[in-house]
Image: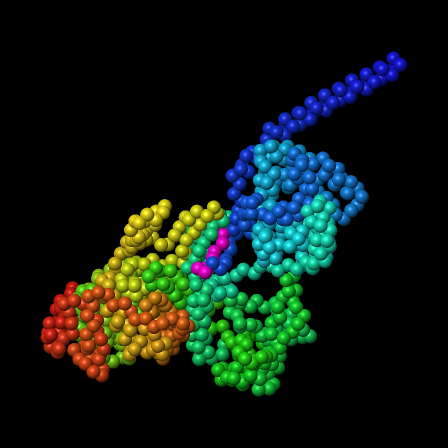
């Protein structure tokens, strides 16, 4: 008995010693690893990289920019079903353990020893948070100890809901998706609240092996793992067995969200916004800051602008012949595979690539480029069609001299004729256009070229081109501000200008002729170069330079007389902005593609509208005066002068170089622009509520042809756009500002008149049309003032000379 007592005592003492030693060793290990543990308190201020989202003006999503596709959701916004699925899949005892789960470790070891395919991890959700946020993924004993120690500390510092929130927003779920919100959108095109049990289970299956469970490459394995998670959810009591059975029977259908500005042909616009955000906030905030950007883009107007521009470019390009096939492929046994491998521009639909299969008949038999399935493989279906004679007649060639079997080119479906296509080619000529709200500067549409996929160079903002005659209204506006009237007479006659080096510059009119004196109105309506140069000489080029800067067309225009007829270089966006100031009565506006920007917390950090609102911050209505908006924008030109130049440019469309636009049947004003050798063609104009500017030319400037002029090519683009944009709007006249007198004058002479051949001309107070003219005037014949009727103010000779 005594021996038994001694044995028990020995065992107890030994156990006690072992326990003390083990505790000491454990304490030493804990102390050692705690010395360099990361600071887990940083989780309190966790701000993960979140993608920036760019929206059109109607709220539709235009683009996303990110390094990690993530949308952050607070725990309260994550449905219970999503939380339950991840807990069943990753950490059954999440709500009961203190950071690590001994039962889970034992269970995972047992499953491993049994050789089951569904290997369970021993890491809890809290441990995964510690690893993902504070440690690395090294598979070492040291890292595991630190992970357990950190998870215990995290559990003591944060609630279970906060830990789950961190986990569900940080976890990588394959296909570049981080967090459940982004994964739901990009796998199923749904919000987390719309997911079914089967869809939630698939997402919960992904953290273990996101690449191995790719739904396209490993579909069967993905379904198997999803069904396993569904079973775990049923075992844990989150769903019923009937719900589990139904969820398992659902096919795994992944519908990746395709987000591209190409859906509304807005690649150039979106890239311009991206550049502005990068310049304003830097790359890190752009790609990780979670900005919410509301742009000015109107998707409907954007599609109209692109169609008008593309139709104009194609119209010019096809008139200059067929360029030839893009390339040739070996038809072989299956022409679809090599055809599918040729990159096609994604922003020129409904155009598509095709290959010539047979050219022996009057029609060209073609095979259409097959699509790729979601896994990236070429689909088996092969579609064919034909290009009938009227589909290639514009080339002026027969099929055999046009293409040969194996040649690849673009075609476009013919509306209403199934299986028939029209031959297309990528235009060599390029161009750009901008549509703008003239009262705010909001860019409603921007097209920087034929195809953003072909070239990202934005010709609306980056191409510096000569505006030609479209600059002339600035010269005439300066004259109207200085006392000229629309009826003032300017000499249209040859003039020689000493350029300062002994060489003489002799400007000429487009037609090469000149014809005596004409009114200011005539000079704009018919785009007379000689009148404009004489007028600029009389005003003095420093004044023209000042107006060009005031309207934002140029920053530092050289004061040479050639600049008065558009020899300087500017952009489509600047010209459209300048014309908008004529349209809005002379108020300065600043062009913008962005209405407002909010940070990740919803705070507005930028807004374009700088008007002040007095009384808008009232807490309640208490019979106080109504809130008022205070507009502090600068008046860049007399509103009466702005209306006069608008009235004159209405005549451009009614009687002048823009007469092709008259068929729109709405109140419009604008001006053509054609440069020397027709290297640049322009039209900039506006309705009372919409401004539109368009440019056409080769990227490497060269002549568009001896007969090319804006009236033939860019004016029709403006016409086509305004037809679409104003289709369902009532015709509205331009607002006549107080003080303007509308007096009937002869359209040719500018003298008072009545009956046929007269128009209502706009005059400022104290001015009016003359009853007759007498020769004379200053400025070396540059201007002749009215001497009868007391209407015109006498206009001095100005500074004259070359500047």
Residue 213: % across, % down: 68, 53
- Please, which residue is most extreme toward the right here? 1
Quadrant in the picture for residue 429: bottom left
Q: Position of residue 241 (x, y in %)?
A: 73, 51
Q: Nearer the viewer, residue 347 or 244?
A: 244
The answer to whether residue 698 shows anywhere in this view is no
Residue 532 appears in the figure: yes
Image-based side of 209 in relation to 74, left or right: right
Chosen colour scheme? rainbow
Which residue is more in the foreground, 720 or 543? 720
> Which of the image's four quarters has the N terminus?
top right
The reply, left or right, for residue 394 in relation to residue 227 is: left
Query: Which residue range is magenta in the image?
Result: 52-58
Q: Return the x and y of residue 52 as percentages of the image width and height.
A: 49, 52
Q: Residue furthest top?
A: 2
**Residue at image x 21%, y 65%?**
738
Using the image, determine if residue 344 lies above or below residue 272: below
Identify the residue at horizontal 27%, vertical 62% (top origin). Answer: 586
Height in image: 293 above or below 761?
A: above
Tell me the quarter of the image containing the C terminus: bottom left
| Residue extending furthest toward the bottom | 362
Count of numbered tags: 0
The picture quadrant where one finds residue 533 is bottom left
Vertically, is 796 above or below 627? below
- Residue 596 shown in magenta: no
Q: Residue at x 46, y 48 (%)?
A: 602
Residue found at x 20% / y 72%: 742
Tell me, yes or no, whether the highlighted magenta stretch contains residue 56: yes
Percent from the top left, x then y, of residue 513?
25, 80
């Amino acid at each position: 008995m005594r021996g038994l007592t001694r044995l028990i005592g020995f065992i107890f003492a030994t156990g006690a010693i072992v326990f003390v030693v083990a505790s000491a060793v454990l304490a030493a290990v804990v102390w050692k690893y705690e010395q360099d543990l990361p600071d887990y308190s940083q989780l309190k201020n966790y701000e993960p990289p979140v993608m920036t989202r760019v929206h059109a003006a109607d709220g539709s999503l235009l683009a996303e920019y990110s390094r990690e596709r993530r949308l952050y959701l607070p725990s309260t916004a994550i449905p219970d079903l999503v939380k339950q699925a991840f807990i069943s899949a990753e950490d059954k005892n999440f709500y009961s353990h203190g950071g690590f789960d001994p039962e889970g470790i034992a269970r995972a070891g047992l499953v491993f020893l049994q050789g089951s395919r569904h290997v369970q991890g021993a890491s809890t959700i809290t441990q995964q948070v510690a690893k993902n946020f504070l440690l690395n993924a090294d598979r070492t004993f040291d890292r595991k100890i630190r992970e357990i120690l950190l998870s215990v500390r995290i559990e003591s510092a944060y609630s279970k809901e906060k830990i789950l929130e961190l986990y569900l927003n940080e976890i990588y779920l394959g296909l570049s998706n981080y967090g459940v919100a982004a994964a739901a959108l990009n796998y199923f095109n749904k919000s987390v609240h719309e997911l079914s049990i089967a869809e939630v289970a698939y997402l919960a299956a992904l953290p273990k092996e996101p690449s191995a469970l790719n739904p396209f490459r490993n579909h069967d394995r993905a379904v198997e793992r999803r069904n396993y998670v569904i079973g775990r959810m049923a075992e844990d009591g989150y769903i019923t067995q009937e719900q589990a059975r139904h969820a398992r029977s659902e096919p795994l259908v992944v519908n990746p969200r395709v987000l591209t500005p190409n859906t509304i042909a807005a690649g150039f616009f979106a890239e311009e916004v991206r550049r502005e955000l990068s310049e304003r906030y830097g790359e890190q905030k752009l790609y990780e800051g979670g900005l919410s950007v509301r742009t000015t883009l109107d998707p409907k107007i954007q599609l109209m602008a692109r169609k008008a521009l593309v139709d104009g470019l194609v119209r010019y390009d096809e008139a200059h012949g067929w360029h030839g096939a893009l390339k040739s492929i070996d038809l072989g046994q299956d022409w679809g595979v090599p055809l599918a491998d040729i990159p096609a521009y994604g922003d020129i639909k409904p155009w598509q690539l095709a290959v010539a299969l047979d050219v022996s008949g009057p029609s060209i038999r073609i095979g259409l480029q097959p699509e790729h399935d979601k896994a990236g493989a070429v689909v088996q279906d092969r579609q064919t069609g034909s290009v009938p004679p009227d589909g290639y007649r514009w080339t002026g060639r027969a099929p055999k001299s046009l293409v040969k079997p194996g040649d690849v080119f673009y075609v476009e479906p013919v509306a209403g004729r199934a299986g028939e296509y029209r031959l297309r080619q990528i235009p060599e000529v390029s161009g750009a256009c901008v549509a703008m709200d003239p009262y705010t500067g909001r860019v409603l549409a921007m097209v920087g070229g034929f195809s953003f996929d072909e070239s990202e160079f934005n010709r609306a903002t980056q191409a510096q081109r000569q505006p030609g005659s479209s600059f002339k209204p600035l010269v005439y506006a300066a004259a109207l501000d200085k006392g000229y009237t629309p009826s003032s007479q300017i000499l249209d006659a040859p003039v020689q200008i000493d350029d300062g080096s002994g060489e003489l510059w002799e400007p000429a009119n487009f037609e090469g002729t000149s014809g005596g004196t004409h009114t200011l109105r005539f000079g704009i309506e018919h785009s007379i170069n000689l009148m404009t140069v004489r007028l600029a000489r009389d005003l003095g080029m420093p004044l023209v330079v000042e107006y060009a800067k005031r309207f934002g067309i140029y920053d530092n225009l050289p004061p040479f007389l050639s600049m008065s007829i558009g020899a300087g270089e500017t952009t489509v966006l600047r010209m459209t902005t300048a014309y908008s100031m004529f349209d809005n009565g002379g108020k300065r506006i600043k062009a913008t593609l962005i209405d407002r920007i909010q940070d990740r917390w919803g705070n507005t950090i930028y807004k374009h509208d700088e008007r002040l609102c007095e009384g808008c911050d009232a807490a309640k209505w208490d019979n106080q005066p109504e809130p008022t908006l205070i507009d502090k924008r600068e008046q860049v030109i007399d509103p009466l002068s702005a209306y006069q130049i608008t009235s004159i440019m209405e005549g451009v469309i009614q009687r002048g170089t823009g007469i092709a636009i008259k068929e729109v049947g709405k109140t419009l004003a604008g001006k053509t622009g054609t440069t020397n050798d027709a290297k640049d063609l322009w039209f900039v104009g506006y309705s009372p509520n919409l401004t539109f500017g368009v440019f056409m030319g080769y990227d490497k400037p060269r002549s568009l042809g001896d007969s090319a002029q804006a009236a033939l090519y860019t004016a029709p683009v403006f016409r086509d756009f305004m037809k679409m944009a104003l289709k369902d709007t009532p015709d509205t006249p331009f607002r006549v500002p107080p003080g303007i007198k509308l007096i009937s004058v002869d359209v040719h002479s500018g003298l008072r008149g009545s009956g046929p051949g007269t128009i209502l001309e706009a005059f400022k107070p104290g001015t009016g049309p003359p009853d007759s003219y007498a020769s004379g005037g200053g400025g070396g014949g540059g201007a002749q003032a009215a001497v009868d009727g007391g209407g015109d103010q006498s206009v001095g000779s100005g500074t004259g000379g070359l500047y």
